[in-house]
Image (cartoon, rainbow, N blue to C red):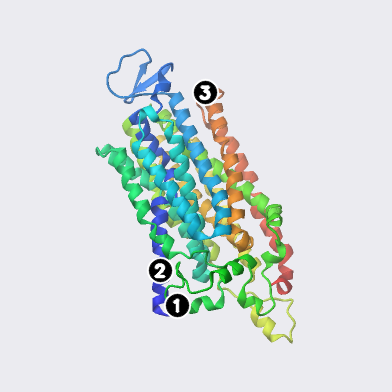
Amino acid sequence: MDLSKNIRKKVILISSLAECLILGGPAYGWPSLVFVLRDRGYFSDLCVNSEQVTYNGNNSSSDQNIDSGYPTCAEQDARLQLVFIIGIFGQNSGALIFGFIYDKFGTRIARIISSTLILLACLIFAFSGPPTSNLTFIALHLLATGSSNLLVTSSQVGNIFGNFRSTVIGLTSGACGSSAVIMVFIQIAYNAGISMMASFSFLAGITVFFTINTVLLPKYKFPWPLPSDLENMKPMDYGATSSVNEKELSEFNASGSNPTTTSNKETSWVDVEYKTRLSCLSSLMFLLFFMWFSIIQLIHLFYLGTVNPRLQELTGDSTDTISTYSEIFTALHSALIVFAFCCGIVVDRNKTKVVPVTNVKDNDSTNYQSHSIRSHFDDLQDFIPAFVITNLLTASFSVCSMITILKLQILTFILGIIGRSFLYALLVAFLAFAFPAKYFGSVYGICRIVAACISLLQYPLLQMVQNVFADNFLYIDLLLVLLNVCSLSLPVYVYYFVLKKRPKVGSEN
């Protein structure tokens, strides 16, 4: 590949990462945004009949007359938690909608719709206020729904980087997670006297600017595996004005076959194992994966949505301390891209190793050459350490969150962020590898919507904490640790799946 093609690939990668860093998942910066919303008095009207009300960090009985500041209370926290739950549901349900749109209509249509939703969300936040607090339900839901598509459409960039595909996908996923830091900037700007309207109006302008990626990315999608002639494209062939016949690319993606291997009359193992979309969704591999993802995501989202109540309990509801720790927590999300990159390296670390294949005929030198490399099952096995590391990180994070030492929460933040970076990097990388490319959008979307339904358990769990366990998170956290242990069934299954299928590599690949 000549220099111009290398530059073109890097421009596409940098532009996609920049967009994901800003717009890929700002809803995950909720702890910082909720601080601004509470300070501005969103849902403060719910505190009128509350038994205990806080003004500006000082505990006061509800009949006190406070001339400045807005009241805060448990009812307000519960309502803001509900806003977050519904918003994150949009992040997952949006993946289902855009997954099917992406599979059916391609990148451009999906991106236009998602950019419009993000723009509307920013404008609603900008022009909302305490009297229109309920608009935050719509705004956060639109923001999360629109941003969910950026990961779907940007992850395909990994396809043009060959053996580093999982690493690039991990970078993209990490960039989406790191975009939570945008809410830190909004909180810092708010504390500096810049209005919420100005901040979200500026974010809306950035959304319009990044329509440039709609031009850089293909109208349909980058196929995987890449056809051999894709390396010989003319300068604009990677973009929307591609001289490659779009119909042929569509047919290529629909078939899911590799031109290089097709010429040798070989078929990818995923096409043999999963011949229909239903066979993907009903497979034990998919069922265990979405169970694993749903459980780990629930643990992280429950903590993410309850950071402020936890900090209130640990700090005695000190506004300044809560503000500082929420800024630290959300700012640490900027490191997600680094840890997601590490996850990609864990998965891709053995891609260049040669693995001998035993069941190849001795007199078939051509067949031996085509198979004297790592098999697809060896690559699948490389996901196992990443799964186990994610479980261990999440378990450590949960244990630290149970210890009621304020300074230790910094370690809780760090472990949680590393665990989430691995979680979302594996979500895209594993589904892109373990199932046919032609079904990626829909398989990914269905996994996210099922996980979204399970994530709705956050609200009843919070109600149990408040009404049954007297604001003590310990018992719910212990339950979530137990579920974490149960989800280890996924790496165990993958290990035995590979063990069972490996002898068939020569015949299936």
The quarter in which the C terminus is drawn is bottom right
Closer to the camera: disc 1 or disc 2?
Answer: 1
**Amino acid beneath label 2:** Lys
Q: Residues within 10 Å of mark 3 (few under 14, many from 20)?
A: few
Q: Name the residue tied to disc 2.
A: 10
Q: Farthest left residue?
A: 193
Left or right: residue 24 compared with residue 106: left
Q: Position of residue 3 (x, y in %)?
A: 39, 78
Q: Position of residue 231 (x, y in %)?
A: 50, 77
The CA distance from mark 2 to mark 3 is 53 Å
Of marks 1 and 2, which one's residue comes earlier in the chain?
A: 2
**Amino acid beneath label 1:** Lys
Q: Position of residue 85 (x, y in %)?
A: 51, 37
Q: Name the residue tied to disc 3.
A: 470
Q: Is residue 345 visible?
A: no
Q: Secondary structure at mark 2?
A: helix
Closer to the camera: disc 3 or disc 1?
Answer: 1
The quarter in which the N terminus is drawn is bottom left
